[in-house]
Amino acid sequence: MIENVKMPKINLLGVRKLLSVVVISLGIFSVGYLVGIKGYKAQIGGRDPYNVTISKELPPEFKDLDFSLFWRVWDTLSSKYFDKSKLVESQLVYGAIKGMVSAIGDPYTVFLPPSENKIVQEDLQGAFEGVGIQIGFKGTQLAVIAPLPGSPAELVGVREGDYIIAIVDLQKGIDRGTNGISLPEAVQAIRGPSGSTVTLTLLREGETEPIEVDIVRKSIDVPSVTHKFEGVDGRVAYVKVLKFSGETLSEWEAVVLDILKNPNVEGIIIDVRNNPGGFLQGAVDLASDFLEAGDVVVKEENADGSSEEFKVEKFGRFRNQNIVILVNGGSASASEIFAGALRDNKKIPLVGKTTFGKGTIQEPQQVDNGAGLHITIARWLTPSGIWVNDGGLVPDYELDDNPDTEEDEQLQEAIRLLNVQ
């Protein structure tokens, strides 16, 4: 459960200074890095955390910005709104900043008030209470990237690729459509305490009518990496990477050691189906175990025209192994980096369905009082120059996993391709 976060008292003078600075600053930062912009520095001083001063005078082009409409609305609300208890200044400030950031039109560039920022941190840690789905956007529509294995969402039939068009939780007072919703708002609406119920209205390809599902939330603890040995004498190591979080590398190391101890292993299947991504560096670390020193894992292109290549800097322990990768429409972001790097460098085949297609990089920033800002700072390309936003990674062997059978057809195809006797 997300605890309420106590907001600081904000005086109106400080608010006016803060919003003027933030509006101007984010106009710049939307095309650059949040930290290290030349020439400007917001300094917090005194007892009032919103007593903001500027260390350098703003350039002429910003001096003509007119904030009179904003302050006219602010003052009108302050003087005429009937229920003064609703006028919580800190929430008004957060709302104004969220609206400004959302005006960019990038669903992955978001301002996170403290309660929403806490949810994001829980996601990266892997333990939370909720329904067990990873969500993102297909175009501008909220969609299910993937349900987690064995989660409440999966058990009631939620599928990868479902569009979420409405969220209802009467206990939390939520009954809304998802048009214009931000990702943190959607997560906060769907997330809730174990035992409570949320109703999602879904649109599914091939269905003519919306589908309503009631999902009872529960406590969920999601590992990053799992593995088992398949085939005769355990000759196939099947490794499922569920996400690229802070714990992924340590869990990966344990799996690698277990595989290296098994002398029967003749091939490895890496399953990143329904892996929504996570940390870019996590994808680089894991991919490096299959590549040669100096190989390019991913290319990053920044807004200022500069670029950077992330290369293998270690001894790849599986660089000579026979490998197949499983992907689907729930494979996004860092999992696409991983799959693209191995295919481009080593011609390792991809089996399954076309990936999600998220080729941008966000930089998380912690700002005042527990709030956060996630800002798109760059796009990434596979080593051969593919930008997955243009359509995802199309697998070399495309086939469905039939939900009406108990057999995993995609996994069986991967085992066949390994040609392990």
Image (cartoon, rainbow, N blue to C red):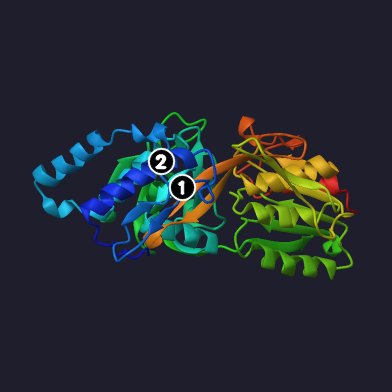
Residue 79 position (above or below residue 232): above
**Left or right of 3: which side holds 226?**
right
User: Considering only order in the chain, which callout, 2 or 1, is on the residue closer to the N terminus?
Assistant: 1
Q: Is residue 171 left or right of residue 125?
A: left
Amino acid type, mark 1: Tyr
Residue located beneath label 2 in the image: 58
Residue found 78% across the figure and 69% down from its top: 258
Q: Kindly identify the amino acid type of the residue bearing the numbered disc 2.
A: Leu
Check residue 40 in the rendering and tell me which mark sits there, or answer none. Answer: 1
> Tag 1, which secondary structure?
loop
Q: Any mark on residue 354, and which? A: none
Image location of residue 403, percent across then percent down: 60, 44
Q: Tell me how far mark 1 sits from mark 2, CA to CA.
A: 8 Å
Which residue is at 43% across, 38% downward? 27
| Residue 345 position within the rendered picture, expressed as x and y whole percent measured from the top left | 83, 43
Which of 186 and 149 lies nearest the eye of the viewer? 186
| Labelled pair 1, 2 in contact (Cβ < 8 Å) | yes
> Looking at the figure, which quarter contains the N terminus?
bottom left
Residue 186 % position (x, y): 40, 47
83 on left or right of 382: left
Secondary structure beneath disc 2? loop
Q: Quadrant of the C terminus?
A: bottom right
x then y, percent, for residue 411: 73, 48
Tell me what residue is drawn at x 62 percent, y 61 percent.
224
> Is disc 2 surrounded by few (<14), some (14 to 19) or many (20+) residues within 10 Å?
few
Query: Residue 97's quadrant in the figure?
Result: top left
